[in-house]
Image (cartoon, rainbow, N blue to C red):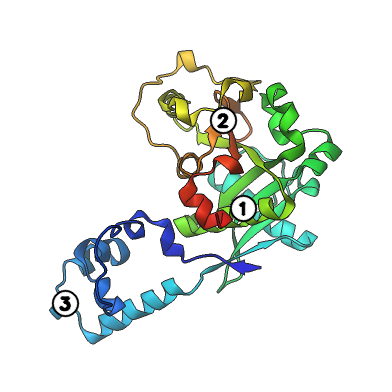
Amino acid sequence: MSDIPNPLAAFDIFNSRFEGKPKRKKINPLKKLFTKKLAKKLFGKKFATKTRADINTQEALVVEKQISKIKKAAFTITWASNADEVKEAQRLRYKVFADEMGAHLPANAEGLDVDEFDAYCDHLLIRDQESLKVVGTYRVLPPHKAAEIGRLYSDSEFDLSRLNHLRPKMVELGRSCVHADYRSGAVIMALWSGLAQYMQKHGYEIMLGCASIPMADGGHFAASLYNSLTNDQMAPVESHAFPRLPLPLDRLNGGLEVEPPPLIKGYLKIGAKICSAPAWDPDFNTADVLTMLRLSEINPRYAKHFLGQ
């Protein structure tokens, strides 16, 4: 079990903003935070409009407490080692997918999202260090376990014939979710850090998985997002997969201006490629696109952070 890096590294306001500028002498970190823009992001508009002279001792103590909390690693990365820990992941999945998103999952007396793949997968857990509650999870199906069960989950949604030669060095990611109260860059970073460690430890090269797009509007958002993808965001033709139940793109408004959901946006930033047109998943009422990330193609900025390269 290891701590993640500084959670604030996930936010752009702390990345490369001061690169190329001459070094300044060290200043009190409390004073460094007192810029109007940054204070607004961290503590809200009311705080940001105050001058330094307006900040009394009590408010300063609150800020110091915030800084102390930020510097302390808030989450831990671990892997489920027994059935009870797997159930923690399954309980979070049910809460997010069924209770929050309205997915049609099999009824379960314990409130768990369970399917036949779980027994073959390794389950990544992100815990809040204070409460020890599982707040983020992925499940990972390694190649030898995929061979044992005879297929990937993605095989049910896509024809993966063109990827068959990659199966021995490919892991499948699935059931990714984060608790509603913890949807921050820090938790996503923790998840990706755990996956990177896993890939390096076992010598795997490729991550594959279905990335979901909400269908609350009937599919117009999903169609527009797919149509907005650029050539460099798409996998080469030889790595394409084909939906078994395609989203009817020609019957949807695919010209809307849209932003990718945070997870897909993160995948694209890190260097992942989209391998398919959207498939409709009626159980989860999502449009799924097959996503592939080769470690050899990871964005150098993230390779340095997650892979130590």
| Residue at image location 37% in from the left, 75% down from the top | 67
**135 versus 224 height, above or below:** below
Q: Which of marks 2 and 1 is nearer the N terminus?
A: 1
Work out how far the residue at label 3 is from the one at label 2, CA to CA, in angstroms. 49 Å
Which one is closest to the eye, mark 2 or mark 1?
1
Residue under the image location 51 percent in, 69 percent down: 74
Q: Is residue 225 visible?
A: yes
Mark 3 or mark 2: which comes first in sequence? 3
Which quarter of the picture shows residue 46?
bottom left
**Which tag, 1 or 3, sits closer to the chain's start?**
3
Residue 22 sits in quarter: bottom left
Amino acid carrying label 2: it is: Val
Q: Mark 3 Cα within 10 Å, few/some/many (few <14, many 20+)? A: few
Percent x, y of residue 126: 60, 61
The residue where tag 1 is placed is 196
Q: Residue 52 carries which label?
A: 3
Left of 72 or right of it: where is 207?
A: right
Q: Do the residues labelled 1 and 3 touch (CB within 8 Å)?
A: no
Spatial CA distance of label 2 from label 1 is: 22 Å
Please name the amino acid that badge 1 sits on: Ala
The amino acid type found where label 3 is placed reads: Arg
Q: Residue 289 carries which label?
A: 2
Q: Which mark is residue 30?
A: none
